Amino acid sequence: MMSAENSDVLFLINWIAMNESNSVGGEEMKMAAYGALSVLKDNLPASFKISEKFEDDFVISALKRHGNHLSVHTISQDHVDPLKLICWLGCAIISEIKDDTFQIQSDVLTAIINSLEETIMLETNCQISLSENDRNLYHRLAIEEIKGNGDHGIGFNGLFIGFHSLRASYNALVKE
């Protein structure tokens, strides 16, 4: 599941995420976003290609969502969260897919969930990973949201908080 290339990119993302500065500049955000996109692309099916122009559009969309999130929730950012970037990049990609069968969206969603899990695994030294049942549940809930069935789904913020909570719980246990 996790290639050496993914490990290198995730190491870069996590290094940025864990930096000690009190604020994160635009260049760091941009570098992290392209790193997160690289991880996501590594998990996409080989048949799913993203042109360079669309890569830039997806990164811009994710960074705008990130800025709006910080503003709405009055967050003073002191690090870049690769989980947020992966979710918002995935959201940008899926929002551009026009497939009434939802198969392509499903394939991209699988790549998003795998990328999130790889990030969690790297951040926890492989102590946290999803069971097949949990991976399938995340997928079923997110695909229902994508299909417009929000009463039975979770969106990309829901995916983010699910993985964020795994990381936060792990970190709390390790500190005890």
Image (cartoon, grey):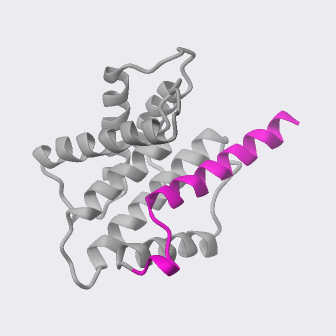
Magenta segment, principal secondary structure?
Answer: helix
The image shows residue 4 at horizontal and vertical percentages of 44, 41
Which of the image's four quarters has the C terminus?
top right
Answer with left or right where residue 111 lies relative to residue 78. Answer: left
Q: Is residue 1 above or below residue 121?
A: below
Q: Residue at x 34, y 37 (%)?
A: 33
Q: In the orientation shown, which residue stands out farthest toward the right?
A: 176
Q: Which residue is drawn at 29% across and 79% down?
A: 102
The image shows residue 34 at horizontal and vertical percentages of 30, 36
Q: Residue at x 33, y 28 (%)?
A: 31
Q: In the orientation shown, which residue stands out farthest toward the bottom?
A: 101
Answer with left or right where residue 119 lies relative to residue 175. Answer: left
In this view, the residue in front, 14 or 155, is 155
Answer with left or right where residue 76 lies relative to residue 112. Answer: right
The image shows residue 94 at horizontal and vertical percentages of 28, 63
Answer with left or right where residue 148 lies relative to residue 175. Answer: left
Q: Is residue 16 above or below residue 139?
A: above
The part of the chain drawn in magenta is 149-176
The answer to if 7 sits in the magenta stretch is no
Q: In this view, does 36 lie above or below 117?
A: above
